């Protein structure tokens, strides 16, 4: 049976564990705190199983710079990992299916074979859930577009007044999505969206939530972007490849509604109804390096698609690049996008916290700043390979997701927050210096009096009225200490001036008083 299309859905999400909320950023998202549940069908898999996957991993790693490997591949047991990779065990032992029921426009049920399900968790508090799907039953482009459009939805994008989700299903939402063959309660991997209410905001589909919590039920996942998973799709079509190869037909094909709908994941009518704008979008998002071979790529902020002929080279070589190397590339950019959004949310949270405990807040900001520096140096790469097509496609992905602007804005926000932490540190140091000043001030006058009397041996003079002088000295020390403490803590200018005058009078009186009794 021939493979007609290959679909990959990537769900980027933010994650948090209730147990670690309130702790510094790096402690909250330490991947060594992830514990696979007892009896879970997820497996931490830093190294691939089987000769085919081992070969593919070797080829992947040689495509990317070595310094990029830390964020792309699980290195196994390390002290401070950036990524942890998990795979679902059932995919290696039995047949799994991804079923999409649709009522919009016309009723369809699409059943695709699940090749693999994986989760990658990152130390930036983000993760990617990935479905690898094979289509052996539906050869038409219209069906492929419908699979992409409805198979990627994870919650209703809108609701129709008076109809709720039922109205949404007439246009943008699948009637249901179901995963079969997994161990566990079947209802956990079935979603018909009927339980969604207007009070449910950014809640992922039940099958998404169940899969992530099967790994660790203390993880609270939240969608990063919107109601859609990122969609990758490879479509085999000799007919379309022929139009791409033909120099006379190519201009019409590459500006057609068909190509626009496939590229921008529209199942029926193109979402752009202005010819000039559509033409501009297609020029910006089409990658035509191998046009004369009949292969065409397209990249948008929510899709990475390709078309080729049905020959063996496309099936055995190009598709392998697509589902391995290009998936890693897409995943990296999605993690960069998710991380910038996660960091922005963290900045917002830290900036609204009370500075009652300024030292703790400054410490938390400092550790968060360290996590940001790590992100810039080990996640946000400007170049990841020496391969020309890799450089060009990676640039298209980053541009489509506006990564350069997002990271620049994030850097400005982080800089402002870091300056705030510096001010808190300076404020704390100033306060500590003020306390030391007060303590020192308490001893200045008493020390001066004691040393004055001791050095001049005034009290040792035989004619000195010692019974009068000693009580006055002791009382002066106590009164001066109290006045100095009060003076250093009061903020009213007139009171402070009066207190300074009184302190001066008492101090001078104490120092000259003994000379009247010599």
Image: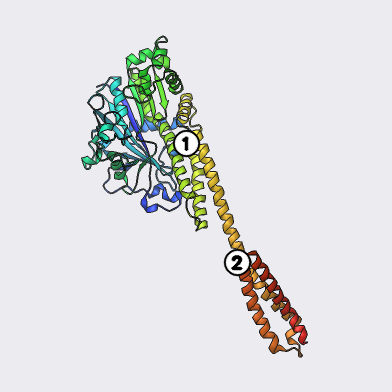
Q: Give x and y (percent) for residue 492.
A: 62, 64
Helix, strand or loop at disc 1? helix
Q: Residues within 10 Å of mark 1 (few under 14, many from 20)?
A: some
Q: Residues within 10 Å of mark 2 (few under 14, many from 20)?
A: few
Q: Work out whether residue 381 can be spotted.
A: no
Q: Is residue 213 left or right of residue 396?
A: left
Residue at 65% over, 78% down: 477
Which mark's residue is nearer the viewer, 1 or 2? Answer: 2
Quarter of the picture containing the N terminus is: top left
Residue 435's mark? none
Residue 489's mark? 2
Is 293 above or below relative to 349? above
Q: Is residue 326 left or right of residue 455?
A: left
| Residue at far top of view | 248
Residue at 40% over, 19% down: 296
Q: Is residue 402 left or right of residue 86?
A: right
Which comes before the other along the chain, label 1 or label 2? 1
For label 1, the residue is: 68
Gap in angstroms between the C-alphas marked 1 and 2? 56 Å
Q: Give x and y (percent) for residue 172.
A: 30, 30
Q: How many marks?
A: 2
Q: Give x and y (percent) for residue 34.
A: 36, 48
In terms of depth relative to the viewer, which is nearer, 392 or 441?
A: 441
Is 459 above or below relative to 95? below
Quarter of the picture containing the C terminus is: bottom right
């Amino acid at each position: 049976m021939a493979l007609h299309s290959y679909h990959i859905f990537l769900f980027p999400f933010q994650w948090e564990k209730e147990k670690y909320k309130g702790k510094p950023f790096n402690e909250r998202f330490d991947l060594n705190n992830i514990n696979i549940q007892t009896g879970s069908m997820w497996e931490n898999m830093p190294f691939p199983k089987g000769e085919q996957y081992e070969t593919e991993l070797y080829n992947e790693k040689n495509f990317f710079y070595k310094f990029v490997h830390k964020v792309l591949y699980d290195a196994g047991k390390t002290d401070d990992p950036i990524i942890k990779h998990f795979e679902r065990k059932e995919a290696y032992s039995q047949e799994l299916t991804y079923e999409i029921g649709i009522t919009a426009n016309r009723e369809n049920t699409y059943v695709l074979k699940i090749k693999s399900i994986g989760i990658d968790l990152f130390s930036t508090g983000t993760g990617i859930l990935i479905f690898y799907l094979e289509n052996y039953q539906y050869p038409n482009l219209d069906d492929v577009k419908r699979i992409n459009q409805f198979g990627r939805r994870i919650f209703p994008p809108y609701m129709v007044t008076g109809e709720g989700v039922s109205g949404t299903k007439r246009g943008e939402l699948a009637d249901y999505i179901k995963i079969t063959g997994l161990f566990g309660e079947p209802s956990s991997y079935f979603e018909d969206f009927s339980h969604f209410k207007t009070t449910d905001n950014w809640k992922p589909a039940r099958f998404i939530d169940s899969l992530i919590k099967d790994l660790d039920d203390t993880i609270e996942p939240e969608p990063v972007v919107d109601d859609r998973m990122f969609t990758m799709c490879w479509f085999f079509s000799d007919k379309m490849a022929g139009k791409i190869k033909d120099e006379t037909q190519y201009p019409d094909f590459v500006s057609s509604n068909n190509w626009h709908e496939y590229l921008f994941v529209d199942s029926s009518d193109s979402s752009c109804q202005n010819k000039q704008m559509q033409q501009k979008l297609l020029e910006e998002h089409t990658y035509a390096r191998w046009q004369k071979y009949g292969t065409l790529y397209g990249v948008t902020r929510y899709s990475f698609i390709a078309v080729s002929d049905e020959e063996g080279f496309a099936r055995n070589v190009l598709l392998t690049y697509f589902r391995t190397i290009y998936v890693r590339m897409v995943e990296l950019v999605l993690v960069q996008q998710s991380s910038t959004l996660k960091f922005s949310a963290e900045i917002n949270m830290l900036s609204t916290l009370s500075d009652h405990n300024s030292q703790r807040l400054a410490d938390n900001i400092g550790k968060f700043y360290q996590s940001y520096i790590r992100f810039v140096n080990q996640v946000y790469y400007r170049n990841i390979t020496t391969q020309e097509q890799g450089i060009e496609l990676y640039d298209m992905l980053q541009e489509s997701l506006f990564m350069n602007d997002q990271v620049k804005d994030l850097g400005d926000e982080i800089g402002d927050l870091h300056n705030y932490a510096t001010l808190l540190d300076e404020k704390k140091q100033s306060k500590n210096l003020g306390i030391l000043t007060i303590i020192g001030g308490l001893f200045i006058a008493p020390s001066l009096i004691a040393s004055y009397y001791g050095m001049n041996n005034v009290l040792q003079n035989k004619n000195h009225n010692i019974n009068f002088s000693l009580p006055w000295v002791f009382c002066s020390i106590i009164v001066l200490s109290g006045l100095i403490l009060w003076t250093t803590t009061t903020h009213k200018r007139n009171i402070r001036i009066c207190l300074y005058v009184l302190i001066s009078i008492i101090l001078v009186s104490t120092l000259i008083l003994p000379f009247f009794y010599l």
